Image (cartoon, grey):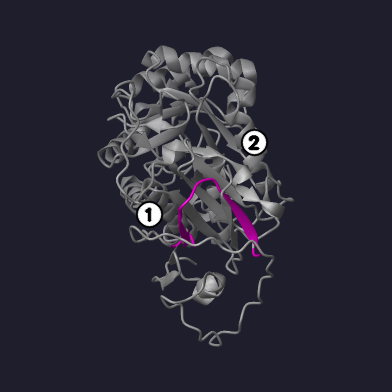
Amino acid sequence: MVHGEVLITPLVWSIVVVLACGICLGAAAAPPAGEKPNDVGIRPSASGRYFVDLAAGPFFWNGDTQWELWRKHGLDEAKLILDKQAAAGFNVFQVFLVGNSNGTEPNAAGEKPWIGSPATPNPKYFDTVDAVVEYGRAKGLIFVIGITHSWIKDHPPATAKAWAKWIAARYKDVPNIIWVPSYTATPDMLRTLAAGLQEGDGGRHLITYHPDPSPLSSKPYHNEPWLAFDCMQTWAYHDKIYPMITELYRMAPTKPVVNAEGAYEEGPEYGFAVTPLWVRRQAWWAVLAGGFTSYGHNDNWRVGPKWRAALEAPGAAQCGVMRKFFESLAWWDLVPDQSLLAGPAAGKAPAAKAPQNVAARSAKGEWAVAYIGTAGPVTIALVRSPPVARLSPPGSTRRPARGRRSETFPPRATSPSPRPPAGRMRRSCSRRSRPRRAAACMERAHSPMIFTSTRFRRLPSNSP
């Protein structure tokens, strides 16, 4: 039953709103019951909605894409990449086993992945793979490894299966691996590769399908017994993120969903600039639709001249902020719910490449999260009372003060004010600021800010 409404008029490009009823946000949340420890890195939860780790605790997938990690990088560079990206908050790494090549090109040590054909793998090529995977294992990192790409069409099924079986057997006892048989294989070849993987490791590791090109998902294979969870690729089609995840989210049997490939930060091929804003949007849309997301930077996957600088990219930092935000909550209890967005924002899919407002709530409706990606008035329906509200642009990970309660914003129409010239905003965001000044306070320097009741506190900004 709707008790009231919160009217928000953000002037910043995106903010996050957390509404809670009678609970303290940021308090340690008990993990769900009924999960059992496992020995294969991560696996789908009992509910099928998310992943759990070795200790059966909820695992928030925050992926990074490093397709060439084992071909164009030596061990020292690979360790540097893992160190930097793990520090930024990434815990899953997507890698092509033989790089973005047809398998005939050598790695940084001069070794090729096979001798003559994939039916005769070259063990020396895998020395770097072994070392990097073990290094990542010690850091708690998961590797999603694609064992073939389009080149597999040039080889007979028997060769493909032998390749898959040999690889899986080599890493049978390595827990932090997930297999991707192929990205472009025919259905028959895909099943052949999956069968080879399962024969090689006894079915121990998870297998998924990362489709290419886009926009595509693993929907045609959802009911295949070897498919542990769904993946999709949206590329430049931002408007497809929410509906594609929603479709997979509603399918039976229930399986986790990952948008494994969106637009790469600073990628030149999309027809628009992939800024940290776009990185942030596609990540938050995916998570609040009920899925997970993987990030990528153009210079990382292509290993361009700026690949080291790309490890410091602001979009990567934004993904880390998102992970910290959700891990401060019982995120695994979230259920997508666009009905929380009342009025013009309610349940409307965006036009291509347009911003979108999305929301999700806890299963019992005790708290909710909304991502506001538009400039303009947005009305959020409150399910219970009294609420605690927290408004935070994605650069912020601060928690609201305990015990404070919000007042309901008057449900009146408002218009967004134009952005003031630099240096012209002088009204302070003090403890006595009124709610109608929330947007103005948040506008200042695009700084992260916490909103609790009528109190506004500007926080140090780390949001580009």
Q: Position of residue 97 (x, y in %)?
A: 45, 33
Seen from the viewer's position, the closer of residues 76 and 427 is 427
Say above or below: 16 vs 145. below
Seen from the viewer's position, the closer of residues 360 and 132 is 360
Q: Which residues are magenta?
A: 375-395
Q: Nearer the viewer, mark 2 or mark 1?
A: 2
Q: Residues within 10 Å of mark 2 (few under 14, many from 20)?
A: many
Q: Position of residue 350 (x, y in %)?
A: 71, 50
Say above or below: 404 vs 170. below
Q: Residue at x 42, y 59 (%)?
A: 405
Kindly identify the amino acid type of the residue bearing the numbered disc 2: Met
The image's mark for residue 282 is none
Q: Quadrant of residue 245?
A: top right
The image's mark for residue 244 is 2
Q: Which residue is mark 1?
A: 88
Q: Residue at x 47, y 25 (%)?
A: 48
> If the image is split into quadrants, where does the N terminus sit?
top right
Tag 1 secondary structure: loop
Q: Residues within 10 Å of mark 1 (few under 14, many from 20)?
A: many
Q: Is residue 245 magenta?
A: no
Q: In the orientation shown, which residue stands out farthest toward the right? A: 351
Q: On the picture, is 85 further left or further right than 191?
A: left
